[in-house]
Amino acid sequence: LLSFVGLENIDIQKLPGQFSGGQLQRIAIARALALEPEIIVADEPTSALDPSIQAQIVNLMLQIQRKRGISYLIISHDLDVIGHVADRIAVMYLGTIIEQGTADEIMRRPLHPYTQALLSAAPTLAARRQVGWKRIMLTGDPPNPADVPSGCRFHPRCHLARDICREKVPPLRAMPGTSQMAACHLAPDETARAGAEVGRARRGLAVVS
């Protein structure tokens, strides 16, 4: 297992403080593999790691998936990593799924305003060069999860919010012409164009070397 995750047999003699953050992450992966699982739940597997080390860990996870047929449930705020690793993505806001679909669909044409804002917060260099490109800025602070707003939970921070958003909880429903689902009263009619613009701004991004 040590060799499989990129460590040496001699490393088994070391103390935890003698390992780097990336090595400790590899050890955590080896411990999970020792149980021969069919699925691994990975909570922020690349957090607190340098970008180059993040790429190594992501590549290791993909290698494990190919060689051992293991599935992952990855919980992360790093949408670039998620977009590179995941087959399907579910986006949550205040504990509720507000959009889900294939990774390609979500990254190329997000339909929920919250997903669009998340993706626009990490633009590519190509996006910044586009005439008229601008980041979707969220206003206000996240609401108290113990006292969620009426209607759509996102409406106090959404620049597209209408009266129906404040009054009625939007169901998570299938979007026409795609396998995506979105919990937004205005999707896809009033959100598709913005989603396509966000997706175009991110194309060509290389996350993992």
Image (tube, rainbow, N blue to C red):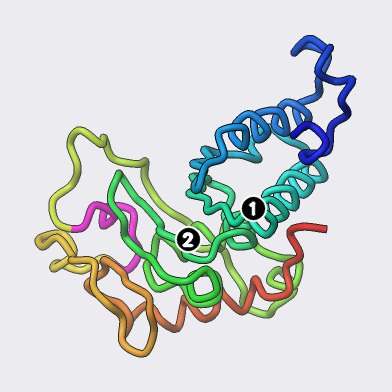
- Label 1 belongs to which residue? 68
**Outermost residue toward the bottom?**
177
Three-letter amino acid code at the position of disc 2: Ala
Q: Are marks 2 and 1 in contact (CB under 8 Å)?
A: no
Q: Residue at x 48, y 49 (%)?
A: 73
Residue 43 spot, x, y in % from top left: 52, 38
Indicate the quadrant where residue 160 lies: bottom left
Residue hosting label 2: 117
| Quadrant position of residue 2 | top right
Residue 141 placement (x, y as % from top left): 37, 41
User: Does residue 207 sit above or below 141 in this rendering?
Assistant: below
Q: Which residues are magenta?
A: 152-160
User: Which label number is shown at residue 172?
Assistant: none
User: Disc 2 or 1, which lies upstream in sequence?
Assistant: 1
Q: Amino acid at mark 1?
A: Arg
The answer to which of 164 and 37 lies nearer the viewer is 37
Pick the quarter of the image with the C terminus: bottom right
Query: Is residue 159 rendered magenta in the image?
Result: yes
Q: Residues within 10 Å of mark 2 (few under 14, many from 20)?
A: some
SS at badge 2: helix
